[in-house]
Amino acid sequence: MKTIKLLLPVLLLALITGCAPTESSGEQMDYEETKKMMVDILKTDEGKKAIQDLINEDEIKESLIMDQTVVSETIEKTLTSEKGTEFWKKSFDDPKFAESMAKSMKTENEKLLKDLMKDPEYRTMMIDVLKDPELEKEVVNTLKSNEYRKHMQSVITETFDSPLFKAKLQDLIIKSSTEISKEQEKEKSE
């Protein structure tokens, strides 16, 4: 409300001076002169403060907040574009970025699974599925098959390619190499 009180006299002054005849030529100010005057007024400290106060009001903030569908569409277009795809490929090549991304997704997935396990209907369905004798036979046959063994090999390979695993492996290698170098230094000193 305070900003409206400050902004109202400024706008009223601009209207009055914009409509008043000029002293030199007796003609009305043209659009360019009025525009220049308004810009000059807005560039003053008082004008800037009035605009800041206006923007800080809750009603104005609510009207300035972007429409969620616009934001969603923009993000979707950005992620699915060729440049977006290239960006994500390059980003996931960095082990630290990939590790942090995997960790953030891991916690969300764990939370989802824990919430599902608390749901009685979901738990009942899981128990019924696991008690099914046909499923048990299928599991045993699957575990004995060559396809399963090949699948396990690919899972192990994927695990070694996982950014989390790579980061942990890197940390272990660095840690063990520092320990080995410390031990070698102790042996030399003795």
Image: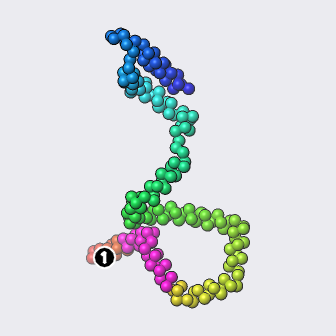
Tell me the residue that label 1 is attached to.
184
> How has the structure been colored for display?
rainbow
| Residue pictured at 56% horizontal, 65% vertical | 109
Whether residue 168 appears in this view of the structure is no
Secondary structure category for the residue under label 1: helix
Tell me what residue is drawn at x 49 percent, y 23 percent. Answer: 7
In the figure, residue 23 lies in which quadrant?
Answer: top left
Magenta segment, prevailing SS (helix, strand or loop)? helix
The image quadrant of residue 25 is top left
Residue 49, position as x, y percentages in the image:
45, 28
Closer to us: 180 or 127: 127
The x, y position of residue 12, in whole percent, is: 48, 18
Highlighted range, magenta: 150-174
Residue under the image location 69 percent in, 65 percent down: 119
Q: Image height check: is 52 above or below 113? A: above
Q: Nearer the viewer, residue 111 or 190?
A: 111
Residue kind at label 1, given as amino acid type: Gln
Q: Is residue 36 above or below residue 118?
A: above
Residue 181 visible in this rendered orientation of the protein: yes
How far across and down, in percent of the image, does residue 5 sit? 52, 22
Magenta run includes residue 154: yes
Mark 1, Cα crowd under 10 Å, few <14 / some 14-19 / many 20+, is few
Q: Find residue 87 and report its horizontal and vertical position in percent.
A: 39, 60
> Quick check: is 168 in the magenta stretch?
yes
